[in-house]
Image (cartoon, rainbow, N blue to C red):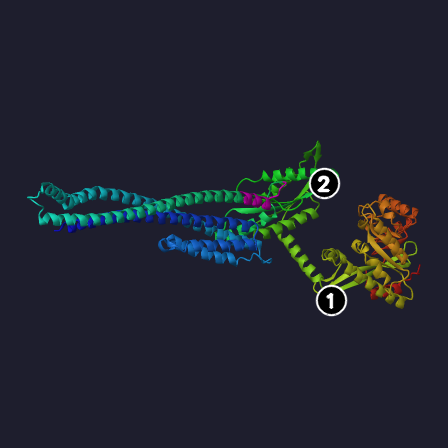
Amino acid sequence: MRLVEKSGFVAVLSGLLLTSVIGLLLWGDLKQTAAHKNYDRANAIKSHVTAFGALAMEALQRPSKRIQQQWTNEAQRVRDRLAGPIADKEADAIQLEMITTELSQAFGAIGFDNKNASPQLRRIQIGRLIAKLQQMTELADRLVENSQANRVEAARVFKTSVWTTVGLLILGVPLLWLGFRSAALKPLKELTRDVAEATLERPLSAAAWQRADEFGLLGREFAEMQNRLISAFDEVADKARRLEQSNRKAQEAASQALEAERRTRDALDAVRDAQAATAQAARHDTLTGLGNRTLLEELSLELTEAAGDSRPDPCGTLLLAIDLDRFKDVNDTYGHAAGDAVLTACGQRLRNRIKGDRDFAFRIGGDEFVLILDFDGSETHAQWYCDHLLDELLCPTEYKGIDLSVGASIGLALLAPGEPLLNALKRADLALYEAKHRGRNQAVAFSATLGAAHDAKLRLINDFKTALERDEITIEVQPQVCARSYALQGIEVLARWDHPERGRQSPAVFVEIAEELKLQADLDRRVLDLALDARKTIEAELGYIPQVSVNVSARRLTSPNLLEELRNRPDLPETGLAFEVLETAFLDSVTGELELTIAALKDLGIKIEVDDFGTGHASFASVLALKPDRLKIDRMFVTGIDKDTQRRDLLRGIVDMANHVSVSTIVEGVETFGEAEAAAEVGADTLQGFAFARPLSVEDFIVWAQKQELRVA
């Protein structure tokens, strides 16, 4: 074999060895670089998933269209990140992308800009999304763990390739050296020896000259190969430097990603803490620390859903609706700070009643509280429990050396199986109203009777809404006679409601309903229309007109449109009309506006009468400050007056005070002629009651008046 061919063979082997070494190094480095990129991408995806959680928590507190748009943007970033090699190789990444798309559609379906959407329903929808986010977080964590494992494996492979390269060099270089020595160095020594021994007598042989030519050619080829090797090594060194710089940048990027993730987690933790504090403040009363109405409604919704998803609970639930009595007096007398002290003390007493995680206390209004207790006793035990609680609430609260005392009324109801909590709370509220109606400072249990009465009232309210339109409001009149001669002096117009099913109803049934519906002014206007029509009918039949007294509510009396309406009525008489106003309308103070209204009514020829005098809380002086024309003394002062001298003396005192200020008196509720004679004896001017006539229709009154042998006063 020629020397060049032997040397070429050795060069080929050297090239193969060099290529193997470079290939191993590049393969290990590329695998390590790809693992680093996948790890960075997985960390970025995890950061976006964490951002999902923060957006969901913020949407739970302050839902808005902006949060919905941010959610969409974050979802798109996750899909962009998953579009690379991860999505092709990781099953978790594929599932993560599917959940991201599913949550984006669900989140977009929530009506953040729909003002009619239920806040409770929206919170439930977002709560379910948060639960789904837990699965996304687990997938992202597994993605990061897998990427980390791949990065560790790539580092191990790279280390193995380095050691393999070292092994190849250790084994290959000596073998190449032996081959090079056999192919080139040995023939070179022989040529050198032949040249040294050559003389004129013994010149070099043709084989030696041929070997010398081969060595020259080999030298030139070796020089070229050396140049190529130097260029190749320079290129490898340059790639190695670039790979080293890339690895350094990848490590720096990984460090920055870890630092950004840490800052993101810290920021999200701060946001969660702030949101938790905001949620706590939004669902709790700042003064007492008890839950507020928002928390009560959310608890009701949760309990209703839990009841629908589980078996009936053998333990019962007791609901207490609590309202403090005379709390306004504390605020008005000692100030709001004293009132806050009372509320705080009551809140603490209720909190002390909470024994487990199924007991709750709420402050839902100024002085309104709700207590929900896990209770397995009977209604009798519940009543006993409430009585003891009432004793605690009635204990005075010390404030700056003063004992502040308030009362309390309690309505209680036991939650029926499957009944919504808010429905049971309504029943407890009805029992609370009944406790107040009975005189306060007591606990009343809801009963079927209370529920039936409430339902009946609701039906009456609905019926009364159209009673005026259907002309169901009518009137009856009751005669008023002279106390000495029994001559007819006037009539009181009494409103009646001809209910299509219940028949004729008295004002005690519907006046309060009219006030609740803000229809009292319409009712007063209707009664006045009927009274003036009746006045014309009576005048036409009897030939004279007795004074007509019409009841007017306090709200109507203070209406700014009253005087203008009266002045514009063409049928308003110049005399003979009186407005009866309840004493309770005046209380203990009379405003200047009310005085002006009374004076203007008198200028129109309308007299003012104070009805049911003696039953309200107004003082005699405050009533007389309005200078009424007549006091109508309540029947409580008249019953049995002919037999009870003390009651007669009391009535005499009222009549004397009225006469002293030139105010006439009328005594109502006179049921016997003995009472009539006694009332006349103490100086009463006019009498009214069953002793003379019951309330009559206008037609029956005309017949009654025509049959009486009474003269007109």
The spot of residue 78 in percent (x, y) is 45, 53
* Residue extending furthest toward the top: 401
Answer with left or right where residue 280 lies relative to residue 310.
right
Answer with left or right where residue 587 lies relative to residue 122.
right
The spot of residue 697 in percent (x, y) is 81, 64
The spot of residue 308 in percent (x, y) is 50, 54
- Quadrant in which the C terminus appears: bottom right
Secondary structure mainly formed by the magenta segment: helix
Residue type at mark 2 is Asn
The numbered dot on residue 470 is 1
Residue at image location 57% in from the left, 46% down from the top? 318
Label 1 element class: loop
Residue 276 part of the magenta segment: yes
The spot of residue 458 in percent (x, y) is 67, 58
Q: Nearer the viewer, residue 469 or 301?
A: 301
Residue type at mark 1 is Arg
Q: Which of marks 2 and 1 precedes in the sequence?
A: 2
Where on the picture, by quarter, is residue 702? bottom right
* Mark 1 → mark 2, Cα distance in angstroms: 46 Å
Residue 407 part of the magenta segment: no
> Which residue position holds label 2?
331
Q: Nearer the viewer, mark 1 or mark 2?
A: 2
* Residue extending furthest toward the front: 200
* Residue extending furthest toward the left: 201
Stretch of the chain drawn in magenta: 273-287
